[in-house]
Amino acid sequence: MTHRADRDDRTTGSTATRGAGRRLRSALIGAALLLGAAAGARAAGNPGPAQIAQLIHARHEHFHALGKTFKSLREQIGRAQPDWNLVATDASQIERLATALPTWFPPGSGPGHGVKTRARAKIWAQPQAFAAAAKTLASRAQDLAQAVPSHDPGSLRLRARALGEACGSCHHRFRAHSSWW
Ligand code: HEC
């Protein structure tokens, strides 16, 4: 039930529910901190609860940037007169983010640490499959960036579609439908 309320807050964007979500989240992080104090001694070298929250927050920020930039690029290449400078900037940012993606998933930043994330435990259980999905994204991002100087919207649209399929295929396998703590 709480999961649903939290997910709804994301879709409706209501300030009241968001506030409640935040309070709930900090309460949970507080509780996790207490539990973590004991676990910390046991698992020296692993990130502590505050660090995990930071890692997951940073990951979400990176994905937001990736999503926003990809949207901007798709919008430009759908125009009759794309702004080619913007397309080039977006494509190289997408390439940079796609290459960095594997570093956003350090061990211990998955579900089960009191911090909301849609990253599935499978990411760390099947590291090779996850790395392959990230690599597909990076190579399609590179294909797209390399095609920008051609200024050929048709070819860029095909490459953008292939890139989008790499996003979707990884989400399908490695991103949960709802958030778990
Ligand atoms: C190799 C796997 C993988 C690829 C490729 C991938 N994603 Fe994701 N994405 C994830 C996972 C896992 C999450 C969940 C992260 C979390 O909740 O901690 C996610 C979350 C997101 C989110 C939500 C962030 C939030 O705040 O909840 C957005 C937006 C997103 N991805 C966009 C994209 C776009 C756009 C692409 C392609 C250009 C892409 N992703 C490619 C695995 C991937």
Image: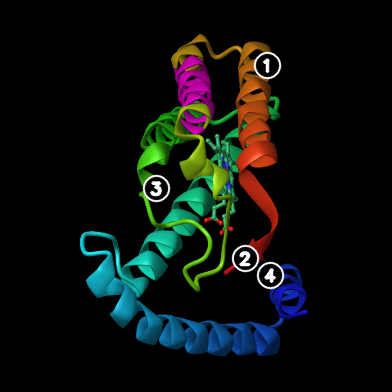
- Tell me how far mark 3 sits from mark 2, CA to CA: 18 Å
Name the dominant secondary structure of the magenta segment.
Answer: helix
- Tell me how far mark 3 sits from mark 1, CA to CA: 27 Å
* Quadrant the N terminus occupies: bottom right
The residue where tag 3 is placed is 104
The residue where tag 2 is placed is 180
Task: Classify mark 4: residues with Cα within 10 Å, few (<14), some (14-19) or many (20+).
Answer: few
Q: Is mark 1 within 8 Å of ligand 1?
A: no
What secondary structure is marked by label 3? helix
Q: Is mark 3 within 8 Å of ligand 1?
A: yes
The residue where tag 4 is placed is 10
- Residue projecting furthest to the front: 42
Q: Is mark 4 within 8 Å of ligand 1?
A: yes
Viewer-side residue, 35 vs 70: 35
Circle 3: residue type: Trp
- Tell me how far mark 2 sits from mark 4, CA to CA: 14 Å
Q: Is residue 34 left or right of residue 90?
A: left
Circle 4: residue type: Arg
Q: Give the range drawn in magenta.
A: 130-145
Query: Residue 45: image x %, image y %?
Result: 21, 59
